[in-house]
């Protein structure tokens, strides 16, 4: 007999233990504990900030997670469904109760952002396979919160999700419209004691995690663990989205653990996460443990799993393995064959002061940062947002770096003189940025108002509403239109805000007003605001 332990997130910091006693051929009999134990019961998690032992160290339970890599060269829903069903059977998965599918739809548009999201055909295939494997279903739903303040309704429509959802007659949850509820955190090393997530996430019984296999300029890769960033709305998503981003990703793992994971790696994304370069990997990756799946994902593209800080932190907290020797990798696409195919897979972990070359009219100066664990760079904050914003501009105007007005971008604590060219304007970005000096002979004092994690109350965060942020940043640029510099405040200054600031000071056409997106986004925005209002008063609106 093989003992496999799963952990289901319940509520208020508790965990329920499911013990499956399974013969080697996976003729499984499921036994579920009726007793719900507090997280503090598991002593191994409170012993040190770096917990190298897994859950139940006293029992010395040895677990060997299984991860499947399957070949799939095209987006055929029927073929995908068959592969997913086969994977569920091999992993002994039978979803039940309130089932929530969580894809990655950070942004989507068939012309402008075609490779940033989990494809609709992939979602279609997973839903079909899930329906054939379910047992006692209370609800089957798809839920997500898209990025950069864009209404999720807009991205679902552009991704083709609404047609799939209608076809299968299941429910859609737009996490920017539903209620956000607090979940208590208990694991040692957490940033906060409480974190806010969408209500359908906190109340679901079985999470199916459907990430898109992509490179990421802030975290190197975005796979299963990172996909949980999308279970929060805008107001809470940007909390700790700075040098603590990878710690936050680790914290989110305590909210909920997936019952099944299937990564869309048929066409993977390179370099950026919003505007990735397509890479035909031809694979579907499946498993039940996020750490195990992400570890295999790292090896697939020649990345050391320990270089993914959020993966290392999650493994140290006992959420799963990070060593390939502890994982049973199988399927019809051998790992070494995948690695032979991905030797030229491109990542992008380049500091912005090196990323933008001499031919660019955008030059960057990176100073020092306040947190001891990352004093030289802020991988989860403003610098990465700048890179993504510039790549969005390139999607609309490929020569934007040469056509824009000259801009000097300053982030972090800077000392010494700042020499601007005659036609150059400076933008000081972020709450942690500070500088004192002279521009055009006049004294300038940029002061930092940075607050560390413990000084930020997540219950009192400011609105990250799309229109409010757009109006605020454009108005600030208008007021400073005759000045050689501007201070963009925020922690972080989001990708959307970067677009507005750069458009104004760099004299670039604002992509928010492109005819392809202007009307559809604003229609979706109005729908989102109405439904969010209704959800404040009526439980049937979730």
Image: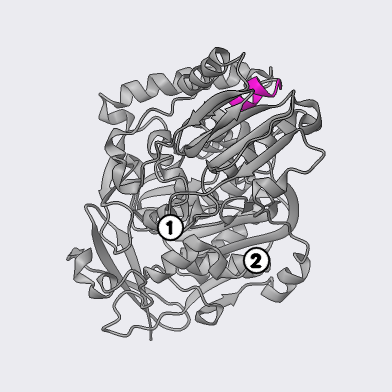
Position of 136 with respect to 398 (left or right) is: left
- Position in image of residue 306 (x %, y %): 54, 70
Q: Which residues are magenta?
A: 498-508
Residue at 56% across, 40% down: 411
For disc 1, the neighbor class at 10 Å (few under 14, some 14 to 19, many from 20) is: few
Residue 404 location, quadrant: top right
Q: Residue at x 60, y 65 (%)?
A: 297
Q: Image quarter for residue 518?
A: top right
Q: Position of residue 25 (x, y in %)?
A: 48, 81
Report which residue position mark 2 lands on: 70
* Residue assigned mark 1: 372
Does residue 131 appear anywhere in the picture?
Answer: no
Using residue 158 as the reference point, say whether residue 94 is left or right of it. left
Closer to the eye: label 2 or 1: 1
User: Which quadrant of the rendered structure holds the C terminus?
Assistant: top left
Label 1: element kind: loop
Give 216 or 98, whichever is nearer the viewer. Answer: 216
Residue 176 x/y as whole percent: 42, 32
Are the residues at dot 2 and dot 1 in contact (C-beta closer than 8 Å)? no
Is 63 within the magenta? no
Q: Secondary structure at mark 2?
A: strand
In the image, residue 503 lies at what x, y percent?
65, 23
Q: Give the CA separation, mark 2 to mark 1.
A: 42 Å
Q: In the rendered image of this protein, does residue 193 appear above or below residue 7?
A: above
- Describe residue 278's horizontal placement relative to residue 190 as left or right: right
């Amino acid at each position: 007999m093989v003992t496999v332990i799963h952990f289901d997130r319940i509520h208020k910091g508790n965990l329920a233990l499911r013990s499956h006693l399974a013969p080697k051929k996976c003729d499984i009999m499921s036994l579920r504990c009726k007793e719900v134990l507090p997280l503090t019961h598991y002593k191994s998690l409170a012993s040190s900030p770096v917990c190298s032992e897994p859950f139940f160290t006293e029992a010395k339970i040895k677990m060997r997670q299984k991860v499947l890599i399957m070949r799939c060269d095209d987006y055929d829903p029927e073929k995908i469904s068959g592969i997913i069903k086969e994977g569920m059977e091999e992993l002994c998965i039978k979803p039940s109760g309130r089932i929530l599918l969580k894809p990655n739809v950070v942004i989507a548009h068939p012309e402008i952002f075609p490779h940033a999201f989990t494809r609709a055909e992939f979602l279609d295939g997973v839903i079909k396979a899930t329906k054939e494997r379910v047992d006692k279903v209370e609800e089957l739903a798809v839920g997500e919160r898209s990025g950069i303040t864009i209404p999720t309704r807009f991205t679902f429509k552009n991704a083709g999700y609404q047609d799939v959802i209608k076809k299968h007659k299941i429910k859609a949850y737009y996490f920017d419209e539903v209620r956000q509820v607090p979940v208590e955190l208990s694991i040692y090393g957490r940033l906060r004691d409480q974190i806010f997530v969408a209500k359908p996430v906190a109340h679901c019984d079985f999470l199916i995690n459907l990430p898109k296999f992509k490179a990421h300029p802030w975290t190197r890769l975005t796979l299963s663990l990172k996909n949980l960033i999308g279970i929060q709305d805008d107001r809470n998503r940007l909390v700790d989205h700075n040098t603590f981003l990878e710690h936050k990703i680790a914290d989110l793992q305590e909210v909920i653990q997936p019952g099944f994971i299937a990564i869309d790696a048929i066409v993977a994304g390179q370099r950026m996460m919003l505007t990735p370069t397509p890479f035909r990997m031809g694979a579907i990756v499946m498993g039940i443990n996020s750490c195990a799946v992400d570890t295999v994902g790292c090896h697939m593209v020649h990345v050391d799993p320990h270089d993914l800080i959020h993966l290392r932190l999650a493994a140290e907290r006992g959420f799963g393995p990070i060593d390939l020797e502890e994982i049973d990798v199988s399927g019809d696409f051998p790992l070494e064959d995948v690695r032979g195919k991905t030797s030229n897979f491109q990542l992008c972990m380049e500091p912005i002061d090196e990323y933008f070359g001499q031919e660019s009219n955008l030059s960057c100066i990176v100073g020092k940062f306040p947190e001891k664990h990352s004093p030289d760079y802020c991988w989860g904050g403003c610098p990465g947002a700048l890179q993504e914003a510039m790549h969005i501009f390139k999607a609309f105007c490929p020569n934007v770096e040469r056509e824009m007005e000259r801009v000097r971008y300053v982030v972090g604590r800077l000392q010494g003189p700042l020499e601007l060219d005659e036609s150059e304007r400076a933008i000081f970005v972020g709450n942690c940025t500070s500088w004192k000096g002279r521009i055009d002979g006049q004294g300038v004092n940029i002061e930092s108002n940075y607050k560390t994690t413990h000084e930020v109350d997540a219950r009192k965060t400011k609105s990250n509403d799309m229109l409010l942020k757009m109006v605020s940043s454009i108005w600030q640029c208008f007021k400073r239109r005759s000045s050689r510099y501007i201070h963009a405040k925020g922690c972080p200054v989001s990708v959307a805000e970067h677009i507005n600031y750069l458009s104004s000071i760099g004299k670039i056409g604002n992509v928010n007003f492109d005819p392809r997106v202007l009307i559809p986004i604003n229609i979706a925005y109005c729908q989102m605001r109405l439904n969010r209002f209704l959800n404040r008063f009526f439980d049937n609106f979730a």
